[in-house]
Amino acid sequence: MTHSAPTNAPRPTVPRKDAPRALSASRVAFYSHLWFGVLFTVVLTVIAVTGILLNHKRGLGLMPDVPHEPSAPFSTSLRIDSLAMLALIAAAAIPGLIEETGGTDPLKAIDRMDVRPRNGFVKVRLRDRASTEFTMDLASGRVLNVGRRGDVFVEKLHSGETLGDGWILLSDAGAIALLVTLVSGYWLWLAPKWRGRAQARETSPAAASAAS
Amino acid sequence: MTLQLILLLAGLFVVPAVLLSVGHRLRRRSARVQSAFWGAILAHIVASLAVVVFSMIPPEGWQSTDTMRGAIGLWSLLVAPAVGAAIGAARAARAARAALA
């Protein structure tokens, strides 16, 4: 036979050793849940929205998607500096772009070059505001596509970098706040159940002895 | 750190902190404070949504004469709750006067 506390009868008050501690832990959980949740609402909203945008950056057209097959063996690819110069020559055809990147020096004008041997192209990203990207054939240097990398800004917004170098700490704080909110939320959900079960265990032997 | 960023941080963290402390035992506070509280909360929520939308404007869309983006992106979280609180307090005062008359 199993013993269980009656649900409709008032429970006898049993003094418990851990009651003040449990209550204070619940208070800490409640106030940390409330304060961290409210204070970091805007930060976490921006992080969540930008995270969704980054997950679907191809579908949303934030970055160019260029389907391409290698036109020649990888060993016959052009040199990396030649590809950089070809990209800058192509960029010179777009009015105002070279001026914005700060000249034709590849070290200043180019942010990064992303080589994709399997696709047979290299992506040359410039250091302009729109992060313009030239997708070029590795073997011939032909420009396959010119497009803006909208996800670069979204990524910086996601990390907090858009406000300055040290501002990634803001997204770190947001992440910690999210963890605190999650843990305290679980505590607020489960702690009353644990307390209820413990209380039921303590009261049921007394109820059983009273019945006998 | 620029003044604009200090204002942004104040709008992000100080304003909600003040609202949280004012919201503690709100029913014991005067009708005017309660009304100001709800006005500020509503304005802060609207401003937060506007900030999220305006923060998504890509850099190529930024211009030096673009005052709207700066005003909403950096100032609104601080200014809007103050305006909302003032409107709320004024409404409560008007309701109190109407009740007396």
Image: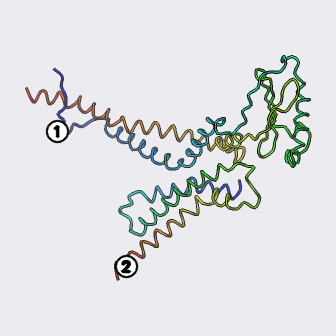
Q: Chain of mark 1?
A: A
Q: Amino acid at mark 1?
A: Asn
Q: Amino acid at mark 2?
A: Ala
Q: Of the numbered discs in the image, which one, if any, rests on residue B98?
A: 2
Query: Would you say A212 lies left or right of B86 here?
Result: left
Where residue A153 sits: x, y (%)? Answer: 70, 43
Where residue A128 sits: x, y (%)? Answer: 81, 44
Query: Would you say B87 lies left or right of B99 here?
Result: right
Residue located 83% across and 21% down the image: A71
For label 1, the SS is: loop
> With respect to residue A141, does B58 lie above or below?
below
> With respect to residue A71, does B89 lie above or below?
below
Where residue A179 sits: x, y (%)? Answer: 51, 37
Residue located 53% across and 48% down the image: A41
Where residue A17 sits: x, y (%)? Answer: 29, 35
Residue located 30% across and 34% down the image: A195
Q: Residues within 10 Å of mark 2 (few under 14, many from 20)?
A: few
Residue carrying label 1: A8
* Most distant residue in the left direction: A212
* Most distant residue in the bottom direction: B101
For label 2, the SS is: helix
> With respect to residue A83, does B97 lie above or below?
below
> With respect to residue B97, does A151 lie above or below?
above
Please name the colour scheme applied to the rendered image: rainbow
Query: Do the residues under discs 1 and 2 have CB atoms within 8 angstroms?
Result: no
Taking depth in this image into account, of B1 and B42 the one nearest to the observer is B42
